[in-house]
Image: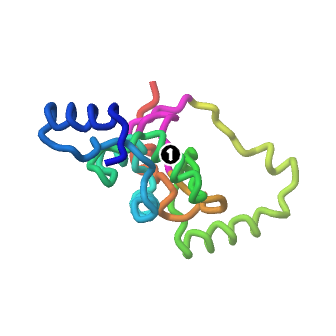
Amino acid sequence: MNLKKTTIFRVRQRLHETDMVSDRPRSGRPTQRQDRNLVRNHMNNRFLLASASSRHTRERNNQRISANTVRRRLSTSGLRARCPYIGPILTQSLRHQRTLWAQEHAACDRIQWRQVVFSDEPRFCIDHADGHVHLWRKSGERYQANCVREHDREAQRGHTHY
């Protein structure tokens, strides 16, 4: 057979322990198909956590892929974990209205702006975690609708001051 005695011993021992002579499953890097699926899932759901994605992604031999592996694979494809822009999703009509407002007030001088009150009230977050929310996006996608975490403007208007 032209094999070493240790090889025959290990195969025999494996047969005795597992009733199989084939290699045991071991971890490995994700395939290109898995990479494409990871990227597609994170492009469809930008706020999907890498740890959640790793729980649902399996390797060829049905073992879990670690969250760090998911992060590396997404980073290789150009996606980065970033804090989302929090604000209203700007539709075409909202963009047009904001542009008109800016054009109307472009000629205002310092005296007129001194009459504007800028408040520094404390901020209370009711509808999302404060700060540690990330999304996966490419460079230049900050204001795209699926990369914006919309805040509830009506809830902010109705809050009570004490």
Please, is residue 159 above or below residue 37 in the view? above
The residue drawn where x is 79% and y is 48% is 113
Of residue 158 and residue 10, the one placed in the foreground of this image is: 10
Residue 32 rendering spot, x and y as whole percentages: 46, 63
- Residue at the front extreme? 2
The residue drawn where x is 55% and y is 46% is 81
Quarter of the figure with the C terminus:
top left
45 inside magenta stretch: no
128 inside magenta stretch: yes
Residue 46 sits in which quadrant? Answer: bottom left
What element does badge 1 sit on? helix
Of residue 42 and residue 128, the one placed in the foreground of this image is: 42
Please, is residue 45 above or below residue 69 in the view? below
| Other-residue count near label 1 (Cα within 10 Å), few / some / many at <14 / 14–19 / ≥20 | many
Residue 40 sits in which quadrant? Answer: bottom left
Of residue 115 and residue 53, the one placed in the foreground of this image is: 53
Of residue 126 and residue 55, the one placed in the foreground of this image is: 55
Please, is residue 63 above or below residue 30 in the view? above
The residue drawn where x is 36% and y is 48% is 53
Q: Name the residue under label 1.
A: 71
Q: What stretch is highlighted in magenta?
A: 122-135
Residue 18 rendering spot, x and y as whole percentages: 15, 36
Side of 153 relative to 53 (left or right):
right
Check disc 1 and give the amino acid type.
Answer: Arg
